[in-house]
Image: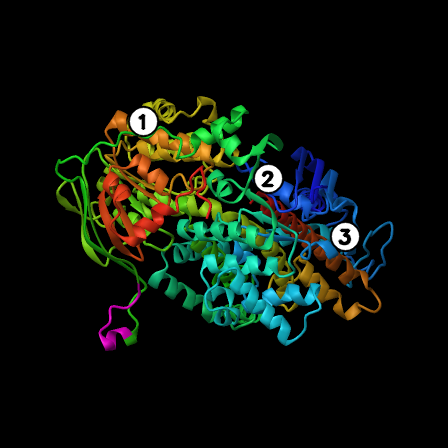
Amino acid sequence: MTPLLKVCDLSVRFGQTVAVDGVTFDLARGAALGIVGESGSGKSVTCRALMRLLPPATNISGSVEFEGRDLLNLSEPELNTIRGKRIAMIFQSPASHLDPLMRIGEQVAEALVEHTDLKGRAVWEEVLRLLDVVRIPDPDRCARAYPHQLSGGMKQRAMIAGALACQPDLLLADEPTTALDATVQKSVLDLLAQLRREQNLSMIFVSHDLGAVARVCDDLLVMRRAKLVERGPVTRVIDAPQHEYTKQLIASHPDRLASRQVAAVSQGAPLLEAQGIQIRYGGKSLADVLTGREGGFVAVKHADFVVRPGETLGIVGESGSGKTTLARSLVGLVKPHKGEVLFDGAPADPSGRGRVAYLRDVQLIYQHPYEALSPRLTVQAAIAEPLRRHRLCPAAEVLRRVAELMAQVDLAPDLAKRLPGQLSGGQCQRVAIARALAFNPRVLIADEVTSALDVTLQAQVMDLLLKLQKERGLTMVFISHDLAVIRRLCNSVIVMRAGEIVEAGPTASVFDAPQQAYTRALIDAIPHLHGDAA
Amino acid sequence: MFVTGLALVLVWCLIALVAPWLATHDPYAIDFVATLKPPGAAHWFGTDNVGRDTYSRVVYGSRLALYIGLLGVIAPLVIGMTVGLTAGYFGGWVDTIAMRLVDITVPFPFFVLVLSIVAVLGPGIENYFIALALVGWVGYARLARSEAMVLRQAEFVLAARTMGFSHRYILLRHILPNALSPIVVYVMTDVTLVILFGAALGFLGMGVSPPAAEWGVMIAEGQSYISTAWWISFFPGLAMVLIGVGFALIGDGLARMLRIER
């Protein structure tokens, strides 16, 4: 049987940069192929090259045969008889690929009108059927909704419905679940796995997340630095990786990291304590005053927690749960509406008078490695800034101290003169950590510090934080949407949802015996290497 | 394009600098023997109705043009940046007050406002500068404000705050340098505008007063001879176009380069 898609020696160059280098693979009808790799490995470019969706100046060579026709040599009109009709594509962020001014139904109908003979009433019925296929509840209402009225997961489903409109033979999925929350991610992955079987769909699934790929695909390609480094059935690659890089990739997956003996919660006096924190955005309007309402938007409804010296508290929750807002209130970036923060047993005012002294003890590390550093300051200048400004060490010692801090976070000394734009994400995050350590803080709050990093870097940063905690006896608050990371790092955990703490307790008991259905759903959604295919 | 613009402006700066050596005549010397002479060997750009050498006057005029253009943007730039950055960074009532001030000037056409202020204060470059300072800062303030509003949410600015740095320090060290690039581009277009309006004031008799070798004044003086002695108004006009195009090209080039950098 001839394969549906035959890619032979595909190379893509942007000017001097080689983005894809000699990639060859086949895809049989009905098969699902996963392409994994870290950022910059060329996986997405490969996927886009198949559809010729790259800028015109791009240099593409090799061949992409789809049912015997070379897609790279087709004229634009010929290609359009295949694009969207025979091969459909879904993208990472449904929000930016849906027209905000068009109803969902109309957008799905677009492809039907363009590529099929359906007309009028039949189009709409087909739209409703498709929305039902992707398991959107109440398709009738959803079809009339605008994109902003749907959640991220629903938008991704609608985009999949649009892609399925013409019953394509091949579906290209480019990081379709990366922008989604864990529980939503799982449901979309399950949907893709089901659609594959029901519609006999062939699929190419591009992702940085091995666990996600394992849930949907049978075969796996691993890419690194524009080259294919390994291929094979998913289970074989995961259980017996051949290439060094694949081994490293799999070893970095939270499933495979040596499980850490998380000590029991210590019993000392709390170091950092939050009592009845409530945070609102926006002030009272006149109507609120008249009706006696509180006004504004409540980001955190009520939060109590304690962190004891030397322990790590994890705060988990999906986007919009208020976890970042809560973290920011601990360092005075947001002023709580009610409640108070206690440090070392005494009331602290992170946004008021004693803030400079307080911030020497409590430091926050931010989510986006590139954004958290001023683009115009070198590594050295960035780390030296707090040392100089707050006279944390004698002026003559500043550079020596910077070098010392860089060494502590495993940054090579020759990086000192570089600007953030010349560093990798992992290196930037190390600089941010070193800068926080310059204060010699007692508490380190880490806000999603690993979520913008590739898995191998993620593992390295986690190890670094663990090392620092051990060496310095740091107390940490670790905020993440990633339960696998939390499980590895934290002694105790609080689970947040819609501004409230739904569950709290020692990590082991929360993970092994979750009390709340929501916590259970979160734990179920952790992508594992051995996909428990739906 | 950028290089062409830069070259043009540099040439003009050079001309202004060595004007005494480039000029063939005294720009103010009246010569009733040689009035309204067309361009020729003795007078390259011809002479005006009182026999002054147009070429020498255009050369000397570059000094005034650059002086007005470069000095005229300083006060608006400084005031606008200060107001805009603080308003955008702090938000709240500071922002409200600053933006209401901006709103006051917005409904009036820029030139009409400058003109009426100069009319009240009396003619002269100093008063033109005062008028620019009163009105011109608005554009800078709006631009700086929008940059600062984005930057204050950036994580590196939040980080600076959680490192306990003062607002003044954060504004100067973290907000200002990162907000600068669009403002630099705006300065370039503004210089052209200020030169143009300065000349327009001169033309209307409200700017530099005659007999100064100022391009606007020269164009005004040549006005009544435009059908017989076109060169009196033509060459200062051409000079103005060339200097304006120079600054505009630099602005364009900078905008493009800074966009790529981002």
**Mark 1 burial class by Cα count in 10 Å: few <14, some 14-19, many 20+:** some
Tell me where the magenta segment starts and ends, as one range: A288-297
- Residue farthest front in this picture: A1
Residue A263 location (% of width, % of height): 22, 31
Q: Residue at x 25, y 53 (%)?
A: A501
**Which type of secondary structure does the marked residue at label 2 adopt?**
helix
**Mark 3 burial class by Cα count in 10 Å: few <14, some 14-19, many 20+:** many
Residue A193 location (% of width, % of height): 52, 49
Question: Quick check: do tags 1 and 2 share a chain?
Answer: yes
Question: Quick check: do tags 3 and 1 share a chain?
Answer: no
What type is the residue that disc 3 sits on?
Answer: Tyr
Q: CA distance from mark 3 to mark 2?
A: 65 Å
Q: Chain of mark 1?
A: A
Task: Tell me, yes or no, if residue A14 can be seen here.
Answer: no
In this picture, residue B129 sits left or right of residue A340: right
What type is the residue that disc 2 sits on?
Answer: Lys
Residue A467 badge: 1
Determine which residue is flagged by label 2: A43
Residue B17 location (% of width, % of height): 65, 43
Where does the N terminus of chain A fall, quadrant-wise?
top right
**Mark 2 burial class by Cα count in 10 Å: few <14, some 14-19, many 20+:** many
What type is the residue that disc 1 sits on?
Answer: Lys
Q: Chain of mark 2?
A: A
Q: CA distance from mark 1 to mark 2?
A: 33 Å
In this picture, residue A459 sits left or right of residue B46: left
Q: CA distance from mark 3 to mark 1?
A: 76 Å
Residue A155 location (% of width, % of height): 50, 60
Q: Chain of mark 3?
A: B
Q: Earlier in the sequence, mark 1 or mark 2?
A: 2
Q: Residue at x 36, y 38 (%)?
A: A485
Task: Tell me, yes or no, if residue A55 can be seen here.
Answer: yes
Q: Nearer the viewer, mark 3 or mark 1?
A: 1
